[in-house]
């Protein structure tokens, strides 16, 4: 079942600063520096949802692992750019959640990169994929808008 991509609330996940050591020979932030920014934001999304990896493991015996991650670069980031990151659920499946994280700058207000990641739920002990626990799904549903 396809979900309305606008049916999910965006969550503020903080931001970062582009430093001179993040630049490549072309004068913009190198691709290698996007990964830690988006990885941290992914963990912050779960934390803000009340579903930290610790809470998932201790309460439900599960946690998530990244199955797939892709970054769509739209504009260059320059030294001194202060960035913001917002995240939302793009899809909830039976065993996975797809997150969409957007990175933009305060300088222009424009989006510079979009990161999509498929997070699969696994049993903490066996590391085998499993269904999303009902209580977890209920917490995630709080991020659905009236359009969904």
Image: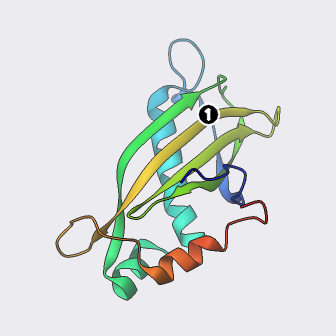
Quadrant showing the C terminus: bottom right
Q: How is the image coloured?
A: rainbow
- Relative image position of residue 48 (x, y in whole percent): 60, 71
Q: Where is residue 61, by image quadrant? A: bottom left
Residue ID at (64%, 25%): 74
Q: Image height check: is 144 above or below 104?
A: below
Residue ID at (65%, 41%): 103
Element carrying mark 1 = strand
Q: Image height check: is 110 above or below 100?
A: above
Q: Please, which residue is most extreme toward the front here?
A: 1
Closer to the camera in the image, 119 or 55: 119
Q: Where is residue 112, by image quadrant? A: top right
Query: Mark 1 packing: few (<14 Cα in 10 Å), some, or many (20+)?
Result: some
Q: Is residue 110 left or right of residue 1?
A: right
Marker count (numbered): 1
Q: Is residue 53 left or right of residue 103?
A: left
The answer to whether residue 18 of the structure is visible from this angle is yes
- Relative image position of residue 106 (x, y in whole percent): 80, 40
Q: Is residue 60 left or right of residue 136?
A: left
Q: Please, which residue is most extreme toward the top here?
A: 26
Residue ID at (57%, 50%): 2
| Disc 1 target residue | 113
Q: Please, which residue is most extreme toward the left here?
A: 126
Q: Image height check: is 6 above or below 144?
A: above
Closer to the camera in the image, 30 or 131: 131
The answer to whether residue 50 of the structure is visible from this angle is no
- Relative image position of residue 122 (x, y in whole percent): 29, 67
- Relative image position of residue 133 (x, y in whole percent): 41, 78
């Amino acid at each position: 079942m396809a979900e309305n991509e606008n049916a999910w609330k965006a969550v503020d996940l903080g931001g970062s600063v582009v430093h001179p050591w993040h630049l490549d020979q072309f004068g913009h932030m190198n691709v290698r520096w996007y990964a830690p920014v988006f990885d941290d934001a992914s963990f912050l999304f779960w934390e803000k949802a009340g579903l930290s990896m610790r809470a998932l493991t201790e309460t439900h015996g599960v946690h998530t692992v990244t199955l797939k991650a892709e970054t769509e670069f739209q504009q260059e980031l320059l030294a001194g750019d202060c960035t913001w990151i917002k995240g939302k659920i793009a899809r909830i499946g039976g065993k996975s959640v797809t997150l969409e994280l957007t990175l933009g700058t305060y300088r222009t207000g424009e989006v510079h990169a979009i990161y999509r990641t498929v997070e699969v739920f696994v049993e903490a002990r066996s590391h085998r994929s499993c269904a999303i626990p009902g209580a977890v799904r209920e917490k995630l549903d709080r991020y659905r808008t009236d359009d969904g």
